[in-house]
Image (cartoon, rainbow, N blue to C red):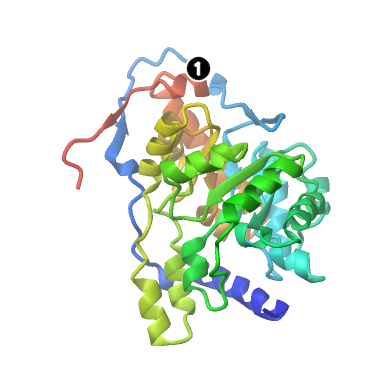
Amino acid sequence: MKDTELTRRKNDHLDIVLDPALAIKKTRTGFEHWRFEHCALPELDLDRIDLTTSLFDRAMQAPLLISSMTGGASRANNINRFLAEAAQTLGLAMGVGSQRVALESDANWGLTRELRKLAPDIPLLANLGAAQLLGQHGSDYAKRAVEMVDADALIIHLNPLQEALQTGGDRDWRGILAAIERVTASLGTPVVVKEVGAGLSPTVARQLYESGVAMLDIAGAGGTSWAAVEGERASTPHKRAVAMAFANWGIPTAQALCQVRKALPTMPLIASGGINDGIDAAKALCLGADLVGQAAAALHSATTSLEAVVEHFQIVIEQLRVVCFCTGSADLTALKHAALLPLENTP
């Protein structure tokens, strides 16, 4: 596929996700089935609640990952800069968008070591699609992706549904797990594996755990539907009809999180996929996540300014802090033991 076609695809993805006129009814995340028990006597100082954590030996001021958003589009230069500077300002982690275009062409779209200069202290995660690991260049691609941004870890994203529906998508996924195993064994940098919005099942999570992966992002259904995005991009009614049938496909985020946490009690987990605010983030942390990722919810601010991105995540952090206060949780460890109750008769 030509570089221009890859770039056009990435620009289409941004246009569709950002266009409110194309809003598509989403699968529910499942977090609406849970509610915290309110604590009317928290016996806490709100301003002293401790949200700090760490990732890959780097300190964080809150358990939030600015999740992978875009790679391969010209406007990603500013987006990546704003996200990196916001992450550094607030002490958050950042995962870059797919580096495939940057690896296969001269266009890096801001995915360089300049990001590390803008954000010297944060956990910074490189990103490559699983299909790019196949073949003789796979391990080299992984190494170059990490070196390109001086990353602390590599995200390998799994998007079989999107590839199946995408014109020119990678349709042969035989050997992907073995390729992931080779990379985890040879890279010398932690590997994180994430879905892109259809969720990880316990079976797949166990396979990845056994392959040596350091962390999983369950990335469940309830956020951006890449099937629907590809349906909007479809060049024919036939392709659109095939794609749109899968607009609500996937394991809801809360369900995937609970199931994977039960299957792998000690595996570090990121929860993403439709995390709308700090209350959703708190629910995810209480249900077993170690970090919470946001992408599409922050994308509009990322196309606006650094100040808009900082403001967006400050709101999420403040919401999370208030949840801790009103559940009597002095820190993230206490929040994991807060009373989060399933709602009865939730539709």
In this picture, is 87 found above or below 285? below
Mark 1, Cα crowd under 10 Å, few <14 / some 14-19 / many 20+, is few
Query: Residue 187 at what x, y percent from top left?
Result: 75, 44
Query: Residue 60 at what x, y percent from top left?
Result: 66, 32
Q: Is residue 235 left or right of residue 314?
A: left
User: Helix, strand or loop at disc 1?
Assistant: loop
Query: Residue 268 at what x, y percent from top left?
Result: 55, 32
- Tell me the quarter of the image containing the N terminus: bottom right
Q: Is residue 237 left or right of residue 52?
A: left
Residue occupying image coordinates x 49% and y 42%? 205
Q: Is residue 279 visible?
A: no
Q: In which quarter of the view is residue 168 placed?
A: bottom right
Of residues 326 and 103, the one drawn nearer to the viewer in this rendering: 103
Q: Is residue 263 visible?
A: yes
| Amino acid type of the residue tagged 1 in the rendering | Asp
Of residues 82 and 199, the one drawn nearer to the viewer in this rendering: 199
Q: Is residue 150 left or right of residue 9?
A: right
In this picture, is 299 found above or below 188? below
* Farthest-out residue, left: 345
In this picture, is 166 found above or below 81? below
Query: Residue 290 at what x, y percent from top left?
Result: 53, 32
Q: In which quarter of the view is residue 87 placed?
A: top right
* Farthest-out residue, bottom: 236
Residue occupying image coordinates x 56% and y 72%? 169
Q: How many marks?
A: 1
Residue occupying image coordinates x 66% and y 62%? 132
Of residues 183 and 280, the one drawn nearer to the viewer in this rendering: 183
Q: Is residue 58 left or right of residue 279?
A: right
- From the image, tell me which residue sits under label 1: 45
